[in-house]
Amino acid sequence: MDLKEEIINDINSNSIILYMKGTKDMPRCGFSNSVVNVLNHYGVEYKAVDILADPMIRVKLSEHSNWPTIPQLFVKGELVGGADITIELHQNGQLLDILDKANS
């Protein structure tokens, strides 16, 4: 399985997955930290992938998602967006509905 197939498999086999800089416990950029804080606020289980561990993850992920920036949040295989969209959805109350789909 090549890296792009592995990314697609991870996205499809994890209800919520966050591609980020750093880890859940140690985010390495403010945008990734913001999304981790929002997800932690809801207490949801999610997989986090550190794109800094392998620079090709970012390349192959962006090829798949057509989204250039990190972090990238996926729920049920669908791209929710980056930090700005995730925070906006959280602030207007829509993110909870999206996250609830992960458990259905």
Image (tube, grey):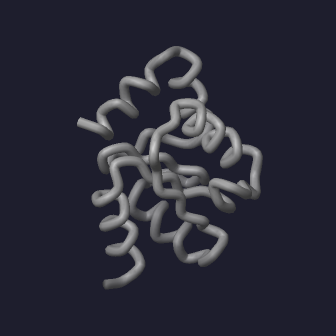
In which quadrant of the rendered view does residue 40 lie?
top right
- Indicate whether 48 appears above or below 1: above
Image point (31%, 67%), residue name? 9
Q: Residue 83, image x and y in percent?
A: 61, 39
Q: Is residue 54 left or right of residue 98?
A: right
Q: Residue 93, image x and y in percent?
A: 49, 16
In which quadrant of the rendered view does residue 66 lie?
bottom left
In which quadrant of the rendered view does residue 13 lie?
bottom left
Q: Residue furthest bottom?
A: 1
Q: Is residue 51 left or right of residue 27?
A: left
Q: Quadrant of the C terminus?
A: top left
Q: Residue 77, image x and y in percent?
A: 31, 50
Image point (47%, 39%), residue name? 44
Q: Is residue 26 left or right of residue 2?
A: right
Q: Residue furthest top?
A: 92
Image point (51%, 52%), residue name? 18
* Residue in the foreground of this view, choosing between 25 and 89: 25
- Indicate whether 77 appears above or below 94: below
- Indicate whether 95 appears above or below 47: above
Image point (30%, 33%), residue name? 101
